[in-house]
Amino acid sequence: MRVESVLVQVLNGLSFGALLFLLASGFTLIFGLLRIVNLSHGALYLSGGYVALVTVTATGNYPLAVLAAGLVVGTLGLVVERALLRPVRGRELPEVLLTIGVAFVLADLCLALFGGEPKRVAPPALLSGSIEVAGLAYPRFRVFVVALAVVIGLGLALVHSRTRLGAIIRAGVDDRETAAVLGIDVDRVFAAMFVAGSVLAGLAGAIGASLLTILPGADTEILLSALVVVIIGGLGSIRGAAVGSVLVGLVDAFSKAWIPDLSYFTVFAPMALVLVFRPTGLFGRVE
Amino acid sequence: MSVWRAGGLAVLAAAGAAAPYVFPSYVIGLLTLVLIAAVFAASINLLAAGGLFSAGHAGISAAAGYGLAYATAHGQAWPQALVLALLVAGVVAGVYALTSMRTATIYFLMVTLALGMVVFGLAYRLNALTGGENGLRDVDRPAAVAEYWQFYYLCLVVLALALAALWVIGRSPFGLALRGIRDSESRMRSLGYNVAGFKFQAVVLSGLLAGVSGVLATYQAEFISPASASFGRSALGLVMVILGGAGTLLGPLAGAAVVALAQNELSVHMDRWQTALGLLFIAVVLFVPQGLTGLAGRGTALLRQARRTRRT
């Protein structure tokens, strides 16, 4: 086994993990505050990818495409939250089931609009080509994705721990009723959080459409990885999402390279281990 | 069981038995699909009675189907194929049970969902065993149920037996413990019940029933592919259970009838039937949360009340 090929797999794992983090952080934030397992998160990701594709094809402007993906999917999230989820607020099961319905509809509409062929959004010239990493030529875009995930992750952590908004969110997570009594408009905070999570899913979709390809079925496949990430990391924990993403990304990269037939199984193994020894995940709160 | 209910069941059974004499083969084929879907929904419903909603049961039933198809393709007669199918289903259900038995509510749903996706992925990737995307073909039915109407009767009998077994289980100490776990897990635990152990048994039992539905489905299509393990299939089963009324005996049959017939009609008449299905899902959750049987129950309660007020 050559050192270079191991290094390449590590980088592949980190960049896929970075993409997973963008997706899983939104998923886990929504869960942490709203207690909703948003199973339409994968479909929102897919929609974001296609929005980016349309925008790039029309304007050729990559940053605009990423922005548009975030905006459109965020709006979609707002509609889903206000129109569908609010009427069943606080009832876990109907909430999950509604998001399954939304996932069905979105994925099918994407198939109707864009067909079954895999599509890819070309990254801009600035981010294509390769870069020297430890004496190794490596795609520049993958390095960019890692950097982006780190920036967004740090930003989320800072907002969460240092700002008034973060304090409101933490209060909502800890005790909704008391937060509401103290004059916090919990309903609005909930909606805002659902939108924020959706924006992250949309961004992830735009990035994923360049890092991987985008096609029908990509939504459930990436949702599986995100689920495993948050089950490992613990629902509601950003730190858990970060650790879980890196772990799942690395396991995925190495298993795809070494035992491709079992790559699905190897992603599942760490999840099973965590569930047996710590059912609430590595950083999940014990309730 | 009240006289009315027993009578209703008898009428239902008689109608089921008479159907092949009345309807053309196309309708009987459709009814067979409904019966198989009902067995599948009943397996999910067994867990739903304990407050556990599986979003990955298609993985178990597909595993059984693959076991059946693999054995048949390798020249085994149907008894051996059936044993292998149920063995595979049992093992997969055991894995489901071990990983999910310490979880509850949405965690249970997520874990089963992830497991279902793993089975789907394995069905795709393990080419040597599953035939990959092409699946396994030519799973001929045993000679005794080769004709469509014979197979229909087999499915009818299997569903009747499954419902009878579920009725007994629901009233057994095991079923009552399961309901106790649904209502308050912590209370059951402090009463000394081994909650994880009960969940393990429930998942394995439910998985075996899902395996039976997988065997029937594979014989019906004489074919199996990764699509039968897909999340969509699992979600459909959940819709049937919720639509019919979670935890009720006949709910799965009612839900399966509506969903399977709607799916059949919609997929013939429009390309976007998945969208329609998603909308149906949303509508059910928003407008019929107790399911059809719950709705019927509320209807009869209203009638009874109306009669009582008229009398006084």
Image (cartoon, rainbow, N blue to C red):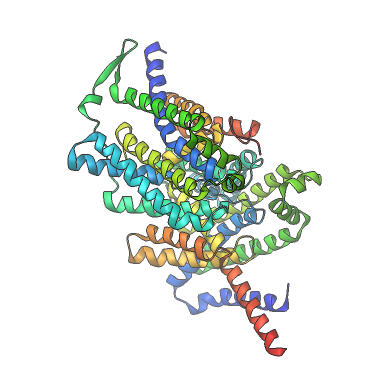
Q: Is residue A170 above or below residue A92?
A: above
Residue A90: image location, x then y, percent: 57, 52
**Residue B27 shows in this picture:** yes
Residue B116: image location, x then y, percent: 52, 44
Residue closer to the observer: B46 or A278: A278
Residue closer to the observer: B93 or A269: A269
Q: Residue at x 57, y 51 (%)?
A: A92
Residue closer to the observer: A181 or A143: A181
Q: Is residue A133 above or below residue A236?
A: above
Residue A148: image location, x then y, percent: 36, 27
Q: Residue at x 56, y 49 (%)?
A: B81
Residue closer to the observer: A65 or A248: A65
Left or right of B260 on screen, residue B54:
right
Query: Looking at the image, which residue sits at the far bottom?
Result: B311
Q: Residue at x 67, y 49 (%)?
A: B202
Residue A87: image location, x then y, percent: 51, 58
Q: Quadrant of the C terminus of chain B?
A: bottom right
Q: Is residue A211 above or below residue B10?
A: above
Query: Looking at the image, which residue sits at the far left?
Result: A59
Query: Looking at the image, which residue sits at the far top?
Result: A135
Q: To which quarter of the image does residue A49 belong?
A: top left
Left or right of A265 on screen, residue A123:
left
Q: Quadrant of the N terminus of chain B?
A: bottom right
**Residue B129 shows in this picture:** no
Query: Looking at the image, which residue sits at the far front?
Result: A183
Q: How many marks?
A: 0
